[in-house]
Amino acid sequence: MDKPQLQETLSIILSQYDIKPALVMNGHPDLAQKIKLFLAGKRLEGLSPLSLKGYELELKIFAEHVPKAANEITTADIRVYLSEFERLKTSSLSKRLSVLKSMFGWLVNEDILTRDPTKQIKPPKKEQRSPKALTIEELEMIREACITPRERALVEVLYATGGRLSEIRKMNHNDIDYQALSVLVIGKGNKERPVYFSFKAMYHLRKYLMRRTDNDPALFVSERKPYRRLSDRGIQREVKVVADRSEVTKNVHPHIFRHTFATLMLNNGADLVAVQGLLGHTDPATTQIYASMTNEKRKQSHHQYLVQ
């Protein structure tokens, strides 16, 4: 086989694969093996590729800082390791500890290790930061800034469903139950739940879909040929274009519509448990964050109903 033919053949074969550098674990080979086992177990449990990648990177850093066999790692080793990241925010430090707790807890449950060195370490207190949400006026300003049917449909679907970015991206128009105004999504932990459209969202969604000439199953696709499903970055870009066109000064991104959905629902009297189910939260404390944002409503009620 001559060289040009060999190059052409290899090019055809390699074009079918997504090639990226291997993540080489430094440190003790025993810990590297335990990390590999843990990630394999989590993959089988249905953890998303994005979460797996995050776990992998965190554990690579840990393996480089603590070059010991897994069964030799002590609670003191982990405390020293975490203390090296003084500039990290509390949330980032909690995440780093959470990954270690998850791994060592899994290794103990699988009888691979006899003890969990993270068991005695309590996570740092969370920073009390309320999620940013749009006011009703700001939401209307975003709506009015939409020009194309796709922009308006995307904004309405993001707000009405309260869905995560990944959930919106994966939606297919054939999966929508137009009578129930709902669609099933796969959320975190591979859990399925229904999300619902408002009449306004369905109106603008139908208007957008009627103008489409492609056969792609995705709910939101690119504007130009070849038509394909909008990526996470594509949706983020679309929202930013609309936000820049509006007079809203907040940092507007896809997730802010989820915050807005939860906050306005609770402000309007929705049950906390119901909102928890709609958002797909496993822990009620996560939904409770939004409930704390309704202090203004309680203040208004005090002024309105207190007999003076």
Image: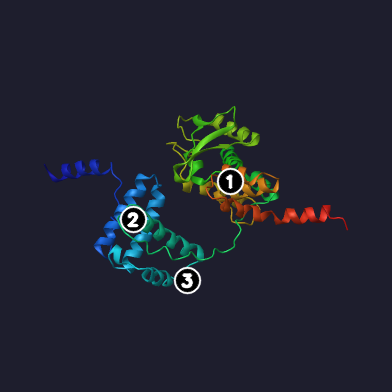
Q: Toward the viewer: 207 or 74?
A: 74
- Element under disc 1: helix
Looking at the image, residue 262 sits to the left or right of residue 234; the answer is right
Q: CA distance from mark 1 to mark 3?
A: 33 Å
Q: Toward the viewer: 6 or 306?
A: 306
- Foreground mark, 2 or 3, reads 2
- Foreground mark, 1 or 3, reads 1
Q: Toward the viewer: 172 or 32?
A: 32
Q: Is residue 119 above or below residue 195?
A: below
Tag 1 residue: 276
Please, which residue is most extreme toward the right here? 308
- What is the x, y in percent for residue 49? 38, 48
First along the sequence among labels 1 and 3:
3
The C terminus: image quadrant: bottom right
In this rendering, the count of numbered labels is 3
Looking at the rendered structure, the kind of residue marked 2 is Leu
- Element under disc 2: helix
- What is the x, y in percent for residue 126? 54, 63
Tag 2 residue: 107
Please, which residue is most extreme toward the left here? 1
First along the sequence among labels 1 and 2:
2
First along the sequence among labels 2 and 3:
3
Displayed quadrant of residue 82: bottom left
Looking at the image, residue 167 sits to the left or right of residue 4; the answer is right
Tag 3 residue: 87
Residue at 62% of width from left, 36% of height from top? Answer: 201
